[in-house]
Image (cartoon, grey):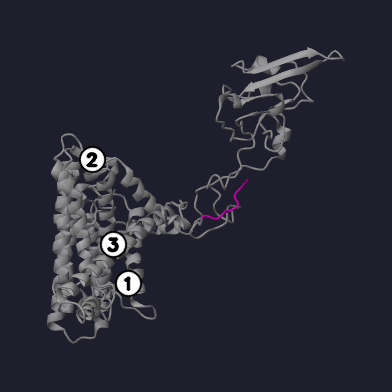
Protein backbone atom coordinates (compact mmCIF):
# COMPACT_ATOMS: atom_id res chain seq x y z
CA UNK A 1 0.00 0.00 0.00
CA UNK A 2 1.44 3.28 -1.10
CA UNK A 3 0.90 6.20 1.25
CA UNK A 4 1.92 8.78 -1.32
CA UNK A 5 -1.60 10.11 -1.72
CA UNK A 6 -2.90 9.68 1.79
CA UNK A 7 -1.68 12.88 3.36
CA UNK A 8 1.91 11.76 3.83
CA UNK A 9 3.07 14.91 2.05
CA UNK A 10 1.43 17.08 4.69
CA UNK A 11 3.09 15.05 7.43
CA UNK A 12 6.47 15.41 5.75
CA UNK A 13 6.05 19.14 5.40
CA UNK A 14 4.99 19.56 9.02
CA UNK A 15 8.00 17.51 10.13
CA UNK A 16 10.32 19.72 8.09
CA UNK A 17 9.10 22.97 9.60
CA UNK A 18 9.19 21.37 13.05
CA UNK A 19 12.87 20.58 12.55
CA UNK A 20 13.48 24.26 11.87
CA UNK A 21 12.64 24.99 15.49
CA UNK A 22 15.86 23.28 16.52
CA UNK A 23 18.09 25.12 14.08
CA UNK A 24 20.05 28.21 14.89
CA UNK A 25 18.25 31.12 13.22
CA UNK A 26 19.78 32.44 10.05
CA UNK A 27 19.21 36.03 11.12
CA UNK A 28 22.26 38.18 11.76
CA UNK A 29 21.47 40.87 14.30
CA UNK A 30 23.48 43.46 12.50
CA UNK A 31 24.78 46.15 14.81
CA UNK A 32 25.63 43.62 17.51
CA UNK A 33 26.66 40.76 15.29
CA UNK A 34 28.66 41.15 12.14
CA UNK A 35 29.70 38.47 9.73
CA UNK A 36 33.21 38.20 8.39
CA UNK A 37 33.13 39.78 4.97
CA UNK A 38 34.88 38.35 1.96
CA UNK A 39 38.65 38.59 2.22
CA UNK A 40 38.77 40.35 -1.13
CA UNK A 41 36.01 42.83 -0.44
CA UNK A 42 36.22 46.21 -2.15
CA UNK A 43 34.85 48.09 0.82
CA UNK A 44 33.70 51.68 1.01
CA UNK A 45 37.11 53.31 1.22
CA UNK A 46 40.70 53.16 0.14
CA UNK A 47 43.82 52.65 2.23
CA UNK A 48 46.96 54.55 1.24
CA UNK A 49 50.51 53.95 2.48
CA UNK A 50 52.57 57.13 2.74
CA UNK A 51 55.97 55.44 2.84
CA UNK A 52 55.40 53.26 -0.22
CA UNK A 53 53.91 55.90 -2.47
CA UNK A 54 56.29 57.43 -4.97
CA UNK A 55 53.81 59.97 -6.25
CA UNK A 56 53.82 58.52 -9.75
CA UNK A 57 50.06 59.26 -10.11
CA UNK A 58 49.38 55.99 -11.94
CA UNK A 59 46.33 55.55 -9.77
CA UNK A 60 45.00 58.96 -10.75
CA UNK A 61 45.41 58.07 -14.42
CA UNK A 62 43.73 54.68 -13.94
CA UNK A 63 40.70 56.16 -12.24
CA UNK A 64 37.74 56.24 -14.66
CA UNK A 65 36.13 59.03 -12.67
CA UNK A 66 39.17 61.20 -12.20
CA UNK A 67 38.49 60.92 -8.55
CA UNK A 68 42.00 60.83 -7.14
CA UNK A 69 43.61 64.22 -6.83
CA UNK A 70 47.36 64.05 -6.35
CA UNK A 71 49.71 67.05 -6.07
CA UNK A 72 53.47 66.60 -5.73
CA UNK A 73 56.64 68.64 -5.69
CA UNK A 74 60.27 67.58 -6.26
CA UNK A 75 62.02 66.58 -3.08
CA UNK A 76 65.70 66.81 -2.02
CA UNK A 77 66.73 63.42 -3.49
CA UNK A 78 65.08 64.18 -6.82
CA UNK A 79 61.99 62.25 -5.74
CA UNK A 80 58.33 63.20 -5.63
CA UNK A 81 56.97 64.43 -2.32
CA UNK A 82 53.21 64.05 -2.10
CA UNK A 83 51.56 67.29 -1.01
CA UNK A 84 48.00 66.27 -1.50
CA UNK A 85 46.35 62.92 -2.02
CA UNK A 86 42.59 63.21 -1.97
CA UNK A 87 39.91 60.69 -2.88
CA UNK A 88 36.25 61.63 -3.11
CA UNK A 89 34.63 58.45 -1.85
CA UNK A 90 31.24 59.92 -2.64
CA UNK A 91 31.98 59.68 -6.35
CA UNK A 92 34.15 56.58 -6.20
CA UNK A 93 32.50 53.44 -7.54
CA UNK A 94 35.07 51.15 -5.89
CA UNK A 95 36.05 49.46 -9.13
CA UNK A 96 39.53 48.79 -7.76
CA UNK A 97 41.36 49.89 -10.96
CA UNK A 98 43.62 52.26 -9.00
CA UNK A 99 44.61 49.46 -6.66
CA UNK A 100 45.38 47.15 -9.57
CA UNK A 101 47.31 49.88 -11.32
CA UNK A 102 49.58 50.84 -8.41
CA UNK A 103 53.10 49.55 -9.16
CA UNK A 104 54.33 49.80 -5.55
CA UNK A 105 51.35 48.33 -3.62
CA UNK A 106 50.90 51.71 -2.00
CA UNK A 107 47.13 51.68 -2.41
CA UNK A 108 44.64 49.04 -1.26
CA UNK A 109 40.89 48.73 -0.97
CA UNK A 110 39.59 49.06 2.57
CA UNK A 111 37.68 46.36 4.43
CA UNK A 112 35.12 48.59 6.09
CA UNK A 113 31.62 48.98 4.73
CA UNK A 114 30.33 51.38 7.36
CA UNK A 115 31.60 54.71 6.10
CA UNK A 116 28.41 56.75 5.77
CA UNK A 117 28.65 60.39 6.74
CA UNK A 118 26.12 63.12 7.27
CA UNK A 119 27.87 65.66 5.02
CA UNK A 120 29.25 65.32 1.54
CA UNK A 121 32.59 66.90 2.37
CA UNK A 122 33.13 64.27 5.05
CA UNK A 123 33.51 61.49 2.49
CA UNK A 124 36.34 63.30 0.74
CA UNK A 125 39.31 61.62 2.33
CA UNK A 126 42.60 63.44 2.72
CA UNK A 127 46.16 62.14 2.86
CA UNK A 128 46.06 61.73 6.64
CA UNK A 129 42.64 60.06 6.73
CA UNK A 130 43.54 57.53 4.07
CA UNK A 131 46.43 56.01 5.97
CA UNK A 132 45.92 52.64 7.66
CA UNK A 133 44.78 52.69 11.26
CA UNK A 134 42.78 50.53 13.63
CA UNK A 135 39.51 51.25 11.92
CA UNK A 136 40.95 51.48 8.41
CA UNK A 137 42.29 48.10 7.42
CA UNK A 138 43.25 47.04 3.90
CA UNK A 139 41.38 44.19 2.22
CA UNK A 140 42.97 41.46 0.15
CA UNK A 141 41.69 42.81 -3.17
CA UNK A 142 44.56 42.43 -5.70
CA UNK A 143 46.88 42.07 -2.69
CA UNK A 144 47.43 38.32 -2.09
CA UNK A 145 49.86 38.91 0.77
CA UNK A 146 47.26 40.81 2.77
CA UNK A 147 44.55 38.34 1.80
CA UNK A 148 46.49 35.46 3.36
CA UNK A 149 46.41 37.15 6.76
CA UNK A 150 42.68 37.86 6.86
CA UNK A 151 40.02 35.64 8.49
CA UNK A 152 37.80 33.55 6.23
CA UNK A 153 34.38 34.76 5.25
CA UNK A 154 31.61 33.42 7.50
CA UNK A 155 28.88 31.68 5.55
CA UNK A 156 25.32 31.35 6.81
CA UNK A 157 24.91 27.93 5.22
CA UNK A 158 27.26 26.48 7.86
CA UNK A 159 24.57 26.24 10.49
CA UNK A 160 25.42 22.76 11.66
CA UNK A 161 27.88 22.60 14.53
CA UNK A 162 29.55 19.50 13.11
CA UNK A 163 30.32 21.34 9.90
CA UNK A 164 32.10 24.07 11.80
CA UNK A 165 29.00 26.23 11.99
CA UNK A 166 27.39 28.29 14.66
CA UNK A 167 26.20 27.36 18.09
CA UNK A 168 22.75 25.81 18.29
CA UNK A 169 20.27 28.01 20.07
CA UNK A 170 16.78 27.06 21.07
CA UNK A 171 14.75 30.23 20.88
CA UNK A 172 17.44 32.31 19.26
CA UNK A 173 17.37 34.74 22.13
CA UNK A 174 18.71 38.19 21.56
CA UNK A 175 22.07 37.48 23.12
CA UNK A 176 25.25 37.85 21.20
CA UNK A 177 26.05 34.59 19.57
CA UNK A 178 29.60 35.40 18.58
CA UNK A 179 29.47 34.97 14.84
CA UNK A 180 32.42 36.58 13.19
CA UNK A 181 33.71 40.07 13.88
CA UNK B 1 -22.80 28.98 40.71
CA UNK B 2 -20.10 31.05 39.09
CA UNK B 3 -17.60 33.20 40.91
CA UNK B 4 -19.40 36.24 39.51
CA UNK B 5 -22.70 35.16 41.10
CA UNK B 6 -20.94 34.75 44.43
CA UNK B 7 -19.44 38.22 44.08
CA UNK B 8 -22.87 39.63 43.33
CA UNK B 9 -24.39 37.95 46.34
CA UNK B 10 -21.53 39.25 48.47
CA UNK B 11 -22.20 42.79 47.26
CA UNK B 12 -25.93 42.28 47.62
CA UNK B 13 -25.49 41.80 51.35
CA UNK B 14 -24.95 45.50 51.90
CA UNK B 15 -25.86 47.17 48.60
CA UNK B 16 -29.19 47.51 46.85
CA UNK B 17 -29.87 44.73 44.38
CA UNK B 18 -29.59 46.76 41.18
CA UNK B 19 -26.22 48.24 42.24
CA UNK B 20 -24.77 44.84 43.08
CA UNK B 21 -26.00 43.47 39.74
CA UNK B 22 -24.52 46.39 37.81
CA UNK B 23 -21.15 46.46 39.59
CA UNK B 24 -20.71 42.70 39.45
CA UNK B 25 -21.54 42.72 35.74
CA UNK B 26 -19.13 45.51 34.95
CA UNK B 27 -16.33 43.91 36.98
CA UNK B 28 -16.88 40.62 35.17
CA UNK B 29 -16.89 42.23 31.74
CA UNK B 30 -13.74 44.23 32.49
CA UNK B 31 -11.98 41.11 33.73
CA UNK B 32 -12.93 39.13 30.64
CA UNK B 33 -11.92 41.99 28.34
CA UNK B 34 -8.58 42.28 30.11
CA UNK B 35 -8.08 38.53 29.75
CA UNK B 36 -8.91 38.70 26.06
CA UNK B 37 -6.79 41.73 25.22
CA UNK B 38 -3.74 40.55 27.16
CA UNK B 39 -3.96 37.12 25.55
CA UNK B 40 -4.43 38.68 22.12
CA UNK B 41 -1.21 40.65 22.62
CA UNK B 42 0.52 37.48 23.76
CA UNK B 43 -0.92 35.65 20.73
CA UNK B 44 0.37 38.24 18.29
CA UNK B 45 3.79 38.04 19.87
CA UNK B 46 3.74 34.22 19.97
CA UNK B 47 2.66 34.03 16.35
CA UNK B 48 5.38 36.37 15.10
CA UNK B 49 8.16 34.78 17.13
CA UNK B 50 7.03 31.23 16.45
CA UNK B 51 6.50 31.85 12.75
CA UNK B 52 9.99 33.30 12.68
CA UNK B 53 11.43 30.21 14.30
CA UNK B 54 9.56 27.96 11.87
CA UNK B 55 11.14 29.94 9.05
CA UNK B 56 14.61 29.92 10.68
CA UNK B 57 14.29 33.62 11.50
CA UNK B 58 14.25 35.28 14.88
CA UNK B 59 11.11 37.38 14.67
CA UNK B 60 10.79 40.69 16.49
CA UNK B 61 13.06 40.67 19.52
CA UNK B 62 14.08 44.27 20.04
CA UNK B 63 11.31 46.04 21.90
CA UNK B 64 11.26 44.93 25.52
CA UNK B 65 12.48 41.53 26.68
CA UNK B 66 12.38 39.23 23.65
CA UNK B 67 10.24 41.72 21.77
CA UNK B 68 7.16 41.26 23.95
CA UNK B 69 6.19 44.94 23.51
CA UNK B 70 6.21 44.76 19.72
CA UNK B 71 2.40 44.31 19.48
CA UNK B 72 1.98 47.43 21.64
CA UNK B 73 4.21 49.37 19.26
CA UNK B 74 2.19 48.05 16.33
CA UNK B 75 -0.98 49.17 18.09
CA UNK B 76 0.43 52.64 18.79
CA UNK B 77 1.46 52.96 15.15
CA UNK B 78 -2.01 51.96 13.97
CA UNK B 79 -3.70 54.45 16.31
CA UNK B 80 -1.56 57.30 15.00
CA UNK B 81 -2.16 56.54 11.34
CA UNK B 82 -4.57 58.56 9.28
CA UNK B 83 -8.04 57.08 9.02
CA UNK B 84 -8.67 56.90 5.28
CA UNK B 85 -12.15 56.37 3.88
CA UNK B 86 -12.34 55.89 0.10
CA UNK B 87 -14.29 58.59 -1.74
CA UNK B 88 -16.85 56.19 -3.23
CA UNK B 89 -17.17 54.06 -0.11
CA UNK B 90 -20.41 53.43 1.72
CA UNK B 91 -19.40 55.57 4.69
CA UNK B 92 -21.78 54.17 7.30
CA UNK B 93 -21.10 50.53 6.49
CA UNK B 94 -17.40 51.24 6.19
CA UNK B 95 -17.48 52.58 9.74
CA UNK B 96 -19.77 49.86 11.03
CA UNK B 97 -18.03 46.80 9.58
CA UNK B 98 -15.05 46.66 11.99
CA UNK B 99 -17.45 46.87 14.90
CA UNK B 100 -19.57 44.02 13.54
CA UNK B 101 -16.44 41.91 13.19
CA UNK B 102 -14.96 42.88 16.54
CA UNK B 103 -17.89 42.73 18.95
CA UNK B 104 -19.10 39.13 18.36
CA UNK B 105 -15.56 37.92 18.96
CA UNK B 106 -15.61 39.52 22.40
CA UNK B 107 -19.10 38.17 23.03
CA UNK B 108 -17.91 34.59 22.56
CA UNK B 109 -15.79 34.91 25.70
CA UNK B 110 -18.89 35.31 27.84
CA UNK B 111 -19.28 31.53 27.87
CA UNK B 112 -15.65 30.39 27.86
CA UNK B 113 -14.96 28.58 31.12
CA UNK B 114 -11.45 29.51 32.18
CA UNK B 115 -11.75 27.63 35.44
CA UNK B 116 -14.48 26.01 37.48
CA UNK B 117 -16.88 28.92 38.01
CA UNK B 118 -14.61 31.42 36.28
CA UNK B 119 -17.07 32.13 33.50
CA UNK B 120 -19.03 35.27 32.81
CA UNK B 121 -22.32 33.45 32.49
CA UNK B 122 -22.83 29.70 32.48
CA UNK B 123 -25.53 29.57 29.82
CA UNK B 124 -27.30 26.25 29.60
CA UNK B 125 -27.12 26.62 25.80
CA UNK B 126 -23.50 27.82 25.84
CA UNK B 127 -22.22 26.05 22.76
CA UNK B 128 -25.23 27.01 20.67
CA UNK B 129 -24.62 30.61 21.70
CA UNK B 130 -21.01 30.31 20.51
CA UNK B 131 -22.04 28.94 17.13
CA UNK B 132 -24.69 31.62 16.70
CA UNK B 133 -22.48 34.53 17.72
CA UNK B 134 -19.43 33.48 15.74
CA UNK B 135 -21.48 33.35 12.57
CA UNK B 136 -22.19 37.09 12.89
CA UNK B 137 -18.64 38.19 12.09
CA UNK B 138 -19.07 36.85 8.55
CA UNK B 139 -21.63 39.63 8.04
CA UNK B 140 -19.08 42.17 9.24
CA UNK B 141 -16.47 40.93 6.81
CA UNK B 142 -19.01 40.95 4.01
CA UNK B 143 -20.03 44.49 4.94
CA UNK B 144 -16.39 45.56 4.93
CA UNK B 145 -15.86 44.11 1.48
CA UNK B 146 -19.01 45.71 0.14
CA UNK B 147 -18.51 49.12 1.73
CA UNK B 148 -14.92 49.47 0.56
CA UNK B 149 -16.06 49.70 -3.05
CA UNK B 150 -12.97 47.82 -4.12
CA UNK B 151 -12.93 44.80 -6.37
CA UNK B 152 -10.43 42.86 -4.27
CA UNK B 153 -12.34 43.57 -1.10
CA UNK B 154 -15.53 42.38 -2.75
CA UNK B 155 -13.91 39.17 -4.01
CA UNK B 156 -12.69 38.56 -0.48
CA UNK B 157 -16.18 39.18 0.85
CA UNK B 158 -17.68 36.64 -1.56
CA UNK B 159 -15.05 34.11 -0.61
CA UNK B 160 -15.66 34.73 3.09
CA UNK B 161 -19.34 34.07 2.87
CA UNK B 162 -18.83 30.92 0.82
CA UNK B 163 -16.17 29.68 3.21
CA UNK B 164 -17.97 30.55 6.44
CA UNK B 165 -21.25 29.01 5.32
CA UNK B 166 -19.55 25.84 4.11
CA UNK B 167 -17.47 25.25 7.20
CA UNK B 168 -20.22 26.07 9.67
CA UNK B 169 -21.94 22.74 8.92
CA UNK B 170 -19.12 20.29 9.74
CA UNK B 171 -18.29 22.35 12.84
CA UNK B 172 -21.83 22.12 14.13
CA UNK B 173 -22.05 18.40 13.35
CA UNK B 174 -18.79 17.81 15.21
CA UNK B 175 -20.14 19.79 18.15
CA UNK B 176 -23.27 17.64 18.20
CA UNK B 177 -21.05 14.61 18.73
CA UNK B 178 -19.58 16.21 21.82
CA UNK B 179 -22.99 17.30 23.05
CA UNK B 180 -24.34 13.76 22.60
CA UNK B 181 -21.63 12.33 24.80
CA UNK B 182 -21.96 15.06 27.42
CA UNK B 183 -25.73 15.28 27.44
CA UNK B 184 -25.56 19.02 27.98
CA UNK B 185 -24.99 22.20 26.00
CA UNK B 186 -23.40 24.05 28.90
CA UNK B 187 -19.68 24.72 28.47
CA UNK B 188 -18.92 24.00 32.13
CA UNK B 189 -20.73 20.65 32.01
CA UNK B 190 -18.90 19.75 28.80
CA UNK B 191 -15.57 20.27 30.54
CA UNK B 192 -16.63 18.49 33.70
CA UNK B 193 -17.83 15.42 31.82
CA UNK B 194 -14.43 14.85 30.21
CA UNK B 195 -12.76 12.28 32.41
CA UNK B 196 -11.07 11.24 29.17
CA UNK B 197 -10.58 14.22 26.84
CA UNK B 198 -12.86 14.06 23.83
CA UNK B 199 -9.85 14.33 21.55
CA UNK B 200 -9.26 10.67 22.41
CA UNK B 201 -12.90 9.62 22.51
CA UNK B 202 -13.80 11.39 19.26
CA UNK B 203 -10.58 11.92 17.31
CA UNK B 204 -12.49 12.23 14.05
CA UNK B 205 -14.75 14.89 15.51
CA UNK B 206 -11.69 16.73 16.77
CA UNK B 207 -10.00 16.71 13.36
CA UNK B 208 -13.18 17.96 11.69
CA UNK B 209 -13.78 20.62 14.32
CA UNK B 210 -10.17 21.76 14.29
CA UNK B 211 -9.92 22.09 10.52
CA UNK B 212 -13.35 23.68 10.40
CA UNK B 213 -12.44 26.30 12.98
CA UNK B 214 -9.14 27.07 11.29
CA UNK B 215 -11.20 27.75 8.17
CA UNK B 216 -13.73 29.75 10.19
CA UNK B 217 -11.07 32.02 11.66
CA UNK B 218 -9.63 32.50 8.18
CA UNK B 219 -6.12 31.42 8.92
CA UNK B 220 -3.63 29.79 6.63
CA UNK B 221 -3.99 27.41 4.79
CA UNK B 222 -7.61 28.55 4.50
CA UNK B 223 -6.82 32.29 4.41
CA UNK B 224 -8.36 32.76 0.98
CA UNK B 225 -10.05 36.00 1.89
CA UNK B 226 -6.75 37.62 2.79
CA UNK B 227 -4.66 35.89 0.15
CA UNK B 228 -1.93 38.52 -0.10
CA UNK B 229 -0.62 37.20 -3.38
CA UNK B 230 -3.99 37.18 -5.15
CA UNK B 231 -6.25 39.86 -3.71
CA UNK B 232 -3.70 41.98 -1.84
CA UNK B 233 -5.20 41.97 1.64
CA UNK B 234 -8.78 41.08 0.95
CA UNK B 235 -11.58 42.73 2.84
CA UNK B 236 -9.47 45.15 4.88
CA UNK B 237 -7.55 46.52 1.91
CA UNK B 238 -9.25 49.93 2.24
CA UNK B 239 -8.92 50.15 5.98
CA UNK B 240 -6.28 51.92 8.00
CA UNK B 241 -5.73 53.30 11.46
CA UNK B 242 -8.03 52.28 14.24
CA UNK B 243 -10.51 50.45 12.02
CA UNK B 244 -7.74 48.24 10.73
CA UNK B 245 -6.58 47.70 14.30
CA UNK B 246 -10.06 46.44 15.14
CA UNK B 247 -9.91 43.94 12.27
CA UNK B 248 -6.45 42.93 13.38
CA UNK B 249 -7.43 42.40 17.01
CA UNK B 250 -10.66 40.76 15.87
CA UNK B 251 -8.71 38.26 13.80
CA UNK B 252 -6.50 37.26 16.69
CA UNK B 253 -9.45 37.41 19.06
CA UNK B 254 -11.18 34.93 16.78
CA UNK B 255 -8.16 32.67 16.91
CA UNK B 256 -8.10 33.00 20.70
CA UNK B 257 -11.83 32.32 20.97
CA UNK B 258 -11.67 29.20 18.86
CA UNK B 259 -8.53 28.00 20.63
CA UNK B 260 -10.49 28.38 23.89
CA UNK B 261 -13.46 26.50 22.46
CA UNK B 262 -11.32 23.68 21.08
CA UNK B 263 -9.72 23.45 24.51
CA UNK B 264 -13.11 23.38 26.17
CA UNK B 265 -14.78 20.89 23.85
CA UNK B 266 -12.00 18.45 23.12
CA UNK B 267 -9.02 19.00 25.42
CA UNK B 268 -10.85 18.83 28.77
CA UNK B 269 -10.63 22.57 29.42
CA UNK B 270 -9.07 23.45 32.75
CA UNK B 271 -8.69 19.84 33.89
CA UNK B 272 -5.25 18.41 34.44
CA UNK B 273 -3.00 17.09 37.17
CA UNK B 274 -0.58 19.00 39.46
CA UNK B 275 -0.82 22.51 38.00
CA UNK B 276 -3.60 24.98 38.88
CA UNK B 277 -6.56 24.86 36.47
CA UNK B 278 -5.96 28.28 34.91
CA UNK B 279 -2.39 27.30 34.00
CA UNK B 280 -3.66 24.12 32.36
CA UNK B 281 -6.21 26.13 30.43
CA UNK B 282 -3.59 28.61 29.18
CA UNK B 283 -1.17 25.81 28.29
CA UNK B 284 -3.82 24.05 26.22
CA UNK B 285 -4.94 27.26 24.50
CA UNK B 286 -1.36 28.16 23.61
CA UNK B 287 -0.69 24.62 22.39
CA UNK B 288 -3.70 24.79 20.07
CA UNK B 289 -2.59 28.18 18.80
CA UNK B 290 0.97 26.92 18.37
CA UNK B 291 -0.35 24.10 16.22
CA UNK B 292 -2.30 26.59 14.11
CA UNK B 293 0.86 28.66 13.63
CA UNK B 294 2.72 25.49 12.72
CA UNK B 295 0.12 24.75 10.04
CA UNK B 296 0.40 28.31 8.78
CA UNK B 297 4.16 28.00 8.53
CA UNK B 298 3.95 24.76 6.57
CA UNK B 299 0.93 24.39 4.37
CA UNK B 300 0.33 26.33 1.16
CA UNK B 301 -2.97 28.08 0.58
CA UNK B 302 -5.82 26.10 -0.98
CA UNK B 303 -7.54 27.08 -4.20
CA UNK B 304 -11.15 28.18 -3.97
CA UNK B 305 -12.49 24.97 -5.52
CA UNK B 306 -10.28 22.87 -3.28
CA UNK B 307 -11.55 24.79 -0.28
CA UNK B 308 -15.15 24.15 -1.23
CA UNK B 309 -14.63 20.49 -2.11
CA UNK B 310 -12.76 19.97 1.15
CA UNK B 311 -15.69 21.30 3.11
CA UNK B 312 -18.50 19.61 1.20
CA UNK B 313 -16.87 16.37 0.06
CA UNK B 314 -14.41 15.87 2.89
CA UNK B 315 -15.46 17.33 6.21
CA UNK B 316 -19.23 17.20 5.88
CA UNK B 317 -19.64 13.46 5.07
CA UNK B 318 -17.04 12.59 7.66
CA UNK B 319 -18.85 14.73 10.22
CA UNK B 320 -22.10 12.90 9.47
CA UNK B 321 -20.37 9.53 9.79
CA UNK B 322 -18.82 10.68 13.05
CA UNK B 323 -22.17 11.85 14.34
CA UNK B 324 -23.83 8.53 13.53
CA UNK B 325 -20.95 6.63 15.09
CA UNK B 326 -21.13 8.57 18.34
CA UNK B 327 -24.91 8.39 18.37
CA UNK B 328 -24.85 4.62 17.88
CA UNK B 329 -22.30 4.21 20.65
CA UNK B 330 -24.36 6.36 22.98
CA UNK B 331 -27.58 4.59 22.09
CA UNK B 332 -26.52 0.94 22.21
CA UNK B 333 -23.43 0.96 24.39
CA UNK B 334 -24.01 3.58 27.07
CA UNK B 335 -22.42 1.52 29.86
CA UNK B 336 -19.31 0.40 27.97
CA UNK B 337 -15.82 1.03 29.31
CA UNK B 338 -14.66 4.32 27.78
CA UNK B 339 -11.20 3.00 26.94
CA UNK B 340 -12.71 0.45 24.57
CA UNK B 341 -14.49 3.32 22.85
CA UNK B 342 -11.18 5.19 22.62
CA UNK B 343 -9.54 2.29 20.79
CA UNK B 344 -12.53 1.76 18.48
CA UNK B 345 -12.92 5.43 17.65
CA UNK B 346 -9.22 6.10 17.05
CA UNK B 347 -9.06 3.14 14.66
CA UNK B 348 -12.24 4.21 12.91
CA UNK B 349 -10.92 7.76 12.58
CA UNK B 350 -7.64 6.58 11.06
CA UNK B 351 -9.39 4.32 8.55
CA UNK B 352 -11.93 7.00 7.60
CA UNK B 353 -9.29 9.68 7.10
CA UNK B 354 -7.29 7.33 4.89
CA UNK B 355 -10.36 6.33 2.88
CA UNK B 356 -11.53 9.88 2.44
CA UNK B 357 -8.10 11.15 1.42
CA UNK B 358 -8.50 9.03 -1.73
CA UNK B 359 -11.19 11.47 -2.83
CA UNK B 360 -8.71 14.30 -2.99
CA UNK B 361 -6.03 12.54 -4.96
CA UNK B 362 -6.05 12.99 -8.68
CA UNK B 363 -8.69 10.84 -10.37
CA UNK B 364 -9.57 9.16 -7.10
CA UNK B 365 -6.06 7.72 -6.89
CA UNK B 366 -6.20 5.99 -10.28
CA UNK B 367 -4.10 8.58 -12.09
CA UNK B 368 -0.34 8.47 -11.69
CA UNK B 369 1.37 11.83 -11.86
Instruction: Work out whether A154 lies above or below B105.
Output: above
**Quadrant housing residue B168:** bottom left
Q: Do the residues labelled 1 and 3 touch (CB within 8 Å)?
A: no
Number of residues whose C-alpha sits closer than 10 Å to that of mark 2, classed few (under 14), some (14–19) or many (20 or more)? many
Number of residues whose C-alpha sits closer than 10 Å to that of mark 1, classed few (under 14), some (14–19) or many (20 or more)? many
Q: Earlier in the sequence, mark 1 or mark 3?
A: 3
Q: Name the residue under label 2.
A: B238
Residue furthest bottom as drawn: B335
Q: Do the residues labelled 1 and 2 touch (CB within 8 Å)?
A: no
Q: Name the residue under label 1.
A: B281
Q: How far apart are marks 1 and 3 (CA)?
A: 12 Å
Please check the rendered image and state whether residue B188 is part of the magenta-colored stretch, yes or no. Answer: no
Rendered location of residue B64, percent (x, y): 46, 55
Q: Which of marks 3 and 2 is nearer the N terminus?
A: 2
Q: Which of marks 1 and 2 is nearer the N terminus?
A: 2
Q: Name the residue under label 3.
A: B256
The magenta segment is: A174-181
Q: Do labels 1 and 2 share a chain?
A: yes
Rendered location of residue B59, percent (x, y): 43, 52
- Judged from the image, the secondary structure of the residue bearing numbered disc 1 is helix
- From this viewpoint, is residue B316 visible? no
Left or right, residue A62 beside residue B311: right
Amino acid sequence: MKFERYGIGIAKGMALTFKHLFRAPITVQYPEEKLNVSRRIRGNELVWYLNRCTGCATCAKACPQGNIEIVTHVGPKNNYVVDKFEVDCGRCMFCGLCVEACPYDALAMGRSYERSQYRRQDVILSKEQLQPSDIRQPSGYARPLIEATLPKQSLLVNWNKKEGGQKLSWLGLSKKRGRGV
Amino acid sequence: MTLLDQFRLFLGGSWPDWAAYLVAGIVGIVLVLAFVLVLVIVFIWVERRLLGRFQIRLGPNRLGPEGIFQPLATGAKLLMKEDIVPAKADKVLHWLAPVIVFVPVLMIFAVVPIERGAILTDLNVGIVYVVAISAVSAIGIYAAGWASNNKYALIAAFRTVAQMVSYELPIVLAIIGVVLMTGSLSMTKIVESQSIPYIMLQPLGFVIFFLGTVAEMNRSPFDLLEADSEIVAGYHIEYSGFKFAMFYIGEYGHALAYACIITTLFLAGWQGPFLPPIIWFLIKVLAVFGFIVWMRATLPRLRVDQLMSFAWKGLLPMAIVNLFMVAAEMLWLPEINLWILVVVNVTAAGVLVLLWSRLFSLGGGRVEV
